[in-house]
Image: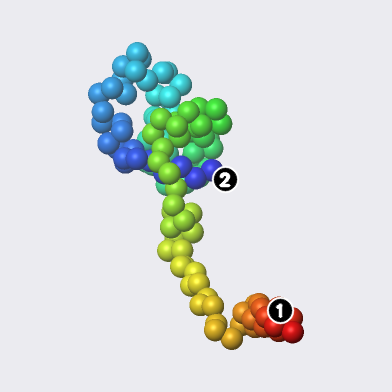
Amino acid sequence: MKLIKLRTTLSKIMSQPDIYLRSKVPEDMYATLVQFAEMRKLDRVNLVVNFDLFPQYDTLMIFERKYGDSISYYDQHGVQKKKRRRRKARAGSDDNNIAGSVRAESIEQTVS
């Protein structure tokens, strides 16, 4: 399934006068916009199938590039992403003890 987030609402896109100019919006892109507008009017999926309102993949990709926006984690999952906490380095961690013991051994060897 492909998620596409529009920059503005579909009704605002359809109300722009540039949509109807073939020099600015190609015929297949206009047809895709009309298909989405008609889909919003219908309340049953079988009507969408019967009227053949599903857009083609290639026009859908062009539609996403022209009118789409980036999708956030919230858009995909419906909840905010949990922030991960960083663990604080403990003063008595194993890495610090190993490094300290190696330094102590090297000091003892140089003194002897």
Amino acid at the residue labelled 1: Thr
In the drawing, what numbered circle is on residue 25? none
In the drawing, what numbered circle is on residue 110? 1
Horizontal side of 87 relative to 18 (left or right) equals right
Disc 2 crowd rating (10 Å Cα; few below 14, some 14-19, many 20+) is few
Q: Secondary structure at mark 2?
A: loop
Quadrant in the picture for residue 41: top left
Residue 20 in view (yes/no): yes
Front residue of 108/8: it is 108
The residue depicted at 29 percent of the width and 37 percent of the height is: 11
Which quarter of the rendering shows the N terminus? top right
Horizontal side of 18 relative to 52 (left or right) equals left
Earlier in the chain: of badge 1 and badge 2, it is 2
Amino acid at the residue labelled 2: Met
Q: Secondary structure at mark 1?
A: helix
Quadrant in the picture for residue 100: bottom right
